[in-house]
Image (cartoon, helix red, strand yellow):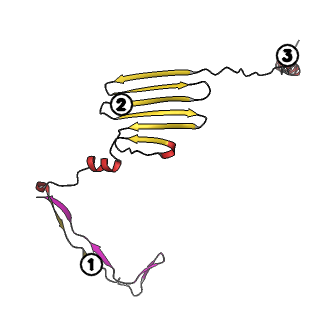
Amino acid sequence: MFKSIYLPVIVSGGVLLLFNAVKAQQISVRPSNVQLQQIQYPPIPFEYAYTSDDPEGSHSAQSSGDGNGRMTGSYSISLADGRTRTVNYVADENGYRAEVTTNELGTESKNPADVVFTSSAITGHEAAILYGPKRELDTQQRISTIATAPITGTLSRPAVSRPLQQGGLSFQGGVNVPTYGTFAGVPQ
């Protein structure tokens, strides 16, 4: 009845009709009576704390909140080499305020950006002098310095009748070119 050549045309035409029928049947579901409601929970105070000990030191923290936006707490670290740092903080309607107490080298007692630093360590400058590289040499390790004075030579004029020009620059005559001898440090 149908030849095989008409079969793809009939099938594709049927699919196209089916697609258009489904497309015409699309229904938009947008309920207009739905309202989002945000649940208001009563303020709940909280409190937590932890401590961790380790052969290389320890650290701990504790924090509490009153349920009305005010939080207080602290955290601290103590290292095996004796360095410690403790931070006590308050966060409320006036912002975050911290007090830092430490003995770490290079810290100083200051009050930058409304944070109070209290340090029992020596200042950074004092630490650099105390623990920095040694600048004094032993009398047995004195170094004798050998240096020669600069030797200057003169470049002679080029053997041309007019000045040499290259790239907009010209060379007119002799130029002193310093050269230096050796410089060495020899232990005595």
Name the side, left or right, on which 87 lies relative to 84.
Answer: right
Name the side, left or right, on which 185 lies relative to 15.
Answer: left
Give the answer, above or below, for where 174 lies relative to 136. Answer: below
**In this rendering, the label closer to the viewer, 2 or 3:** 2
Q: Residue at x 50, y 33 (%)?
A: 89
Residue receiving disc 2 = 78
Residue 130, numbered label: none
- Tally of marks: 3
Quadrant of the frame with the C terminus:
bottom left
Residue receiving disc 3 = 3
Please provide percent x and percent y for residue 145: 17, 64
Q: Residue at x 34, y 47 (%)?
A: 123
Label pair 2/3, CB-CB below 8 angstroms:
no
Give the answer, above or below, for where 167 lies relative to 119. Answer: below
Q: CA distance from mark 2 to mark 3?
A: 90 Å
Mark 3 lies on a secondary structure that is loop
Mark 1 lies on a secondary structure that is strand
Kind of residue sitting beneath label 1: Gly
**In this rendering, the label closer to the viewer, 2 or 1:** 2
Kind of residue sitting beneath label 3: Lys
> Does residue 176 belong to the magenta stretch?
yes
Please provide percent x and percent y for residue 167: 47, 75
Nearest to N terminus: mark 2 or mark 3 = 3
Residues shaded magenta: 164-188
Residue 153, numbered label: 1
Mark 2 lies on a secondary structure that is strand
Quadrant of the frame with the N terminus:
top right
Nearest to N terminus: mark 2 or mark 1 = 2
Q: Residue at x 46, y 37 (%)?
A: 99
179 and 120: which is toward the camera: 120
Please provide percent x and percent y for residue 134: 23, 51
